Image (cartoon, helix red, strand yellow):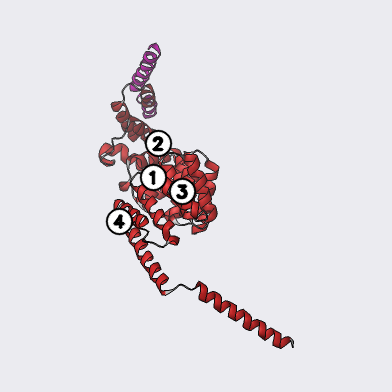
Amino acid sequence: MLIRETRTSQVRILVLLLVAVILTAPTRGEESDQQKDGAFLANLDQLLTRGEAQQVVDLAIEALRAQTVHPRNQWRVQERLAVALVDLDRAPEAVSIIEDALAENPDEPSLHLYLARALRQMGQKGRAVAEFRQAVDMNPSQYQWRLEYAEMLLALNIRRDALTQIRLARRECGDCDEALRGEVNFHLTVGNSAAALEPLQVLNSRGSDRDIQSLLIQALWAAGDSEAVVTMIDTLGVESLNGAEVLILAQAERMLGKAVQSRVWAQGGQEVLPGQWAAPATFWAIVSETCLLDEDLDQALMAIDRAIALEPGRAVFHHNRAAILVALGRQEEARQALAESERIAASAKGE
């Protein structure tokens, strides 16, 4: 009896399921509408990718006016229309369109994202943050959205939450380059180059571009790792450096007291430096000090003379020159240099 009842129940369930399938299955006409709508939406996406925003606006408005898309796809057309309007710097219109779409589809995370972008363009940062938060909460796996959200938070100086979103994005995408660069940009924006060291090292280990290598040199210097700075620059080659990197290398050699490249600079002058970079007097003073620490007195004197030629009114340069001359045993010249240093200092006080 139990077996018979069970079989009867199974038959009833199968019948109900079959009826449900029949009732919910799209008709041929509906399938055709879906294909037509899908092709239309794909065309809008291609136009957006090509930057033809105005054409998207024209096509979308016409489709919505003529009701040529199925009602369930209307919000998708509105979404693309809003994206195009933002591309055309017509954010207020985009906000109105998206809010209409959201009224019917409040659980669509992408609509919250595009509303956030439109609000950001309008300068409504508070509302934009709320919409970004809604979008990422509804679709947490979208790491690109988190990075946008982090940018918005950082613009409002909400630093801790911004960094949290970036770290979540890194976890979601498996430390993808985009998220790593996002963290680098965060640390550089808040003025903490040393903190950017870890993501920069990961990026550099993947054979990143020259810009990443330059930022890594700066981060290593900010972290106080002079040895690592010199080692990395040795790998890149001094001839590839720009002016900022040359200055960092000069300071790193001074910290180490090793005038390896400083000796070359002191002897060769501007000709051995990057062609478009005019070395300042402070650079030559650093080179001079490094050579002095490494007991290369002749090169130290040559470098401080270059500094003085660029800024003759700096008392400290003449004082340093006096110290080098004393070490060289040229006492009379040293006294003259010291006297000049004192004269310049006294003149500055008189002013």
Lower position in the chain sequence, tag 1 or tag 3: 1
Q: Which residues are magenta?
A: 322-351
Q: Nearer the viewer, mark 1 or mark 2?
A: 1
Q: Residue furthest front?
A: 66
Element under label 2?
A: helix
Per the image, is 344 magenta? yes
Residue lying at 47% horizontally and 40% vertically, measured from the top left: 125
From this view, report whether residue 251 is shown above or below residue 18: above
Q: Nearer the viewer, mark 4 or mark 3?
A: 3
* x then y, percent, for residue 236: 35, 51
Q: Which residue is mark 4?
A: 50
Q: Which residue is mark 3?
A: 99
Between the residue at mark 4 and the residue at mark 1, the CA separation in whole angstroms equals: 22 Å
Q: Quadrant of the N terminus?
A: bottom right
Say which amino acid is labelled 4. Arg
| 4 and 1 marks in contact (CB < 8 Å) | no
Between the residue at mark 1 and the residue at mark 2, the CA separation in whole angstroms equals: 62 Å
